[in-house]
Image (cartoon, rainbow, N blue to C red):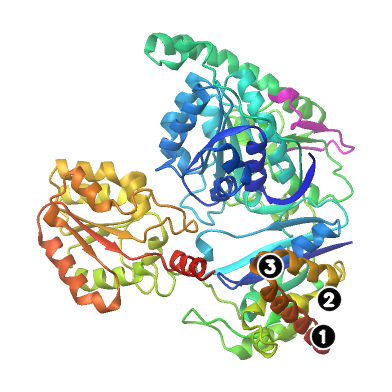
């Protein structure tokens, strides 16, 4: 069994903490894992992505082949579409619906929506709003992780919650609970929206 | 004690160096190598043992510091991005001549596809050039194992070794099994002291020895636990897979590769293994990340006895990093079914952060430069290089670390006026100070703007070597004190900033404008740390 995930977003949005939590959970569950990250110049407000591969068997390539991704998980709707050629035919897109407009020629939202609709299996939720609704406004990325957990059958959601506890432990109990709450809200929302 | 940890390739290398009894890491930050040194800086063993881990001014001072550690019989690590090899090349090549006493590992992280670099040079060429063995791990576990192996190897063969990583190896995480560490070496000096004094009389003797040793290094590569020849059932093709390209090959054959494969992770290139592969195959395919170093050597000027495919004949792209997809195509396998690209996607280039001091500096500089249509601005390497993009379009050149001021001088000598250089604080102490001395000595008509954000910003906010001392450094180099001006880049200061820039452009000599405000990213971090 394997799950190949492309995590996408804009530099500074926090895709790497999603990857870190999944990594901690995968390690705990004894899965093989490879996670290629982007550091350096592109982190300054440019598009960023991380290739995250989980498998019960050893993994060779650090990069996911085109057409090989089971999931695209994105904190930004246009960034989700950027990696469409990597998505497998039966793959899922889990994306935030709130655009991050730091470029002058950002496309029309209707065009983005049409592209998403044509992509097949999509969970599109406003993670910023959901994060606010459970009083965790700074944990939008954990809402997205929660939504991902609803279709990520290779990892047990409880292991992901443990992952959050482990990763955020040094920031104190209050931050841990805020993030778990955001995760749960994302999970519930995805079950409703899938 | 055995332990399993999730580590970047960079971190696996760093941890292995610590476990090998490292005495000092010497480095200048550079993507994708920065995390090696940062991992060592943050590791408890570093504090416990007092391992040297301060950032060096540049890659040359780093390499020299490490060579000193090796001379003293202890183990050292040098880390840099690929272009850093150019900066330390003098030391690196001559360290092949002195050889190593304590284990000396030089980690060079190449950036094919130029994710965060100005070229895609392949550091393996430096290994061959300096007649130094090269290791090229194919996965994170191998990065750990090879570094553990490289230290005693370096000591046994009395030679520095080059550890070559590429972006996908450096910045990809996997589970790594680690083992019991070793203590540091004791102080002990080289057996042959003449080798460390490279006077021609000594160097000639050593050069002959090194040429002989290099053949011996190749025998080591033939026997290496990291190189192996795997049999196959289909002999129409034999594949040579170097470094991480091995993964892309195996990714495309989940049930095993039908062709014989030579995996190469240790150089000098093991020719005996390649001959063994070629004898049983009709043609060869060379997979290598970076430039076609192996392929060029197999495929000479004369018609080859066996066709060799790779980057040179178009089987693989001539430039850019390898991917599972381009390797798949080279193997003649059909592409996987995938979605078509979306039309609703546009480029999102990186940009200077909102609130960044470089923005305010460029705004003021552009306002003044508009008044001087004959002017040219020469910039340098750092976050501020993003000032070439919209909306600033603030300069005409950016080449390598330190080239701003020296190119501005050459242009000034040629009659360009005003000739303006823009450099960051960390780039200035890396490679700008000697150029400033040239400018002072030649009384060049140049204006140097140091955009000082008190850190090495682009790589994530490491210490900058001259923080708090830039005025003193410029004065010490000989710039007249009244032409060393300091301004604070903020919108409310635009009139004052523009006035200062205008005055110094009009001064016909060397002037320095230090434009100082803390990096917005490190400022946020410092504020958060204070709150806690």
Q: Position of residue B91 (x, y in %)?
A: 43, 29
Residue plotted at (63% across, 91% down): A110
Mark 1 and mark 3 lie on one chain; the one further toward the N terminus is 3
Q: Name the residue carrying label 2.
A: A151
Mark 1 to mark 2 CA distance (whole Å): 9 Å
Mark 1 to mark 3 CA distance (whole Å): 28 Å
Vertical placement of residue B516 versus B139, above or below: below
Tag 1–tag 2 contact (CB < 8 Å): yes
Q: Nearer the viewer, residue B464 or B196?
A: B464
Q: Name the residue carrying label 1.
A: A194
Give the structural element (helix, strand or loop) at label 3.
helix
Q: Which quadrant would residue B287 be assigned to in this image?
A: top right
Q: Name the residue carrying label 3.
A: A168
Vertical placement of residue B487 versus B312, above or below: below
Q: Chain of mark 3?
A: A
Mark 2 to mark 3 CA distance (whole Å): 23 Å
Q: Residues within 10 Å of mark 3 (few under 14, many from 20)?
A: some
């Amino acid at each position: 069994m394997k799950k190949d995930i492309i995590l996408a977003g804009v530099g500074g949005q926090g895709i790497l903490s999603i990857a870190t939590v999944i990594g901690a959970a995968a390690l705990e569950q004894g899965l093989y894992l490879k996670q290629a990250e982007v550091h350096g110049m592109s982190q300054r407000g440019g598009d960023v992505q991380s290739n995250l591969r989980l498998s019960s068997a050893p993994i060779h390539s650090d990069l996911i082949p085109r057409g090989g991704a089971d999931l695209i998980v994105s904190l930004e709707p246009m960034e989700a579409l950027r990696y469409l050629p990597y998505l497998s035919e039966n793959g899922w897109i889990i994306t935030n619906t709130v655009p991050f407009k730091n470029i002058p020629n950002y496309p029309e939202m209707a065009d983005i929506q049409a592209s998403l609709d044509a992509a097949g299996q999509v969970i599109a939720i406003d993670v910023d709003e959901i994060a606010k609704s459970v009083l965790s406004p700074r944990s939008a990325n954990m809402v997205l992780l929660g939504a991902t957990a609803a279709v990520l059958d290779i990892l047990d959601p409880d292991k992901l919650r443990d992952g959050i506890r482990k990763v955020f432990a040094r920031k104190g109990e209050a931050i841990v609970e805020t993030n778990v709450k955001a995760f749960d809200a994302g999970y519930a929302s995805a079950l409703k929206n899938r | 004690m055995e332990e399993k940890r999730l580590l970047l390739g960079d971190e696996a290398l760093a941890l292995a160096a610590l476990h090998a009894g490292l005495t000092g890491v010497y480095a200048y930050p550079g993507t994708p190598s920065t995390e090696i040194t940062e991992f060592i800086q943050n590791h408890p063993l570093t504090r416990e043992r007092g391992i040297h881990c301060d950032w060096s001014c540049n890659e040359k001072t780093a390499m020299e510091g490490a060579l000193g550690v090796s001379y003293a019989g202890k183990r050292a690590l040098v880390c840099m991005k690929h272009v850093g090899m150019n900066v330390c090349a003098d030391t690196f090549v001559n360290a092949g001549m002195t050889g190593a006493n304590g284990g000396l590992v030089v980690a060079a992280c190449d950036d094919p596809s130029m994710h965060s670099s100005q070229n895609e040079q392949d550091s393996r060429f430096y290994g061959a050039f300096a007649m130094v063995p090269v290791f090229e791990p194919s996965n994170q576990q191998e990065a750990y194992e090879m570094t553990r192996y490289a230290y005693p190897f370096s000591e046994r063969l009395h030679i520095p070794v080059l550890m070559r990583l590429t972006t996908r190896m450096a910045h990809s995480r996997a589970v790594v099994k680690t083992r019991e560490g070793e203590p540091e070496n004791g102080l002990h000096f080289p057996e042959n002291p003449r080798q460390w004094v490279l006077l021609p009389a000594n160097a000639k003797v050593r050069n002959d020895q090194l040429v002989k040793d290099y053949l011996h290094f190749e025998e080591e590569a033939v026997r290496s636990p990291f190189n192996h020849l795997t049999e196959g059932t289909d002999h129409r093709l034999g594949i040579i897979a170097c470094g991480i390209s091995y993964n892309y090959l195996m990714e495309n054959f989940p049930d095993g590769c039908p062709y014989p494969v030579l995996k190469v992770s240790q150089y000098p290139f093991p020719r005996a293994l390649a001959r063994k592969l070629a004898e049983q195959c009709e043609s060869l395919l060379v997979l290598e990340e970076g430039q076609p170093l192996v392929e060029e050597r197999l495929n000479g000027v004369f018609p080859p006895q066996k066709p060799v495919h790779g980057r040179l004949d178009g089987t693989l792209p001539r430039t850019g990093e390898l991917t599972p997809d381009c390797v798949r195509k080279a193997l003649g396998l059909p592409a996987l079914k995938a979605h078509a690209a979306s039309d609703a996607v546009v480029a999102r280039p990186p940009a200077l952060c909102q609130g960044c001091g470089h923005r305010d500096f460029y705004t003021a500089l552009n306002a003044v430069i508009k008044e001087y249509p004959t002017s040219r601005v020469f910039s340098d390497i750092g976050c501020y290089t993003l000032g070439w993009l919209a909306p600033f379009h603030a300069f005409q050149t950016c080449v390598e670390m330190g080239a701003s001021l020296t190119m501005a001088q050459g242009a000034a000598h040629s009659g360009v006026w005003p000739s303006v250089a823009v450099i960051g604080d960390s780039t200035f102490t890396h490679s700008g100070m000697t150029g400033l001395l040239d400018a002072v000595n030649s009384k060049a008509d140049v204006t140097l703007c140091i955009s000082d954000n008190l850190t090495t910003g682009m790589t994530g906010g490491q210490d900058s070597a001259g923080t708090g001392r830039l005025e003193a450094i410029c004065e010490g180099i000989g710039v007249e004190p009244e032409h060393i001006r300091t301004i604070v880049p903020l919108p409310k200061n635009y009139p004052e900033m523009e006035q200062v820039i205008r005055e110094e452009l009009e001064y016909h000599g060397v002037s320095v404008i230090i434009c100082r405000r803390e990096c917005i990213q490190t400022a946020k971090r410092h504020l958060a740390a204070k709150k806690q």
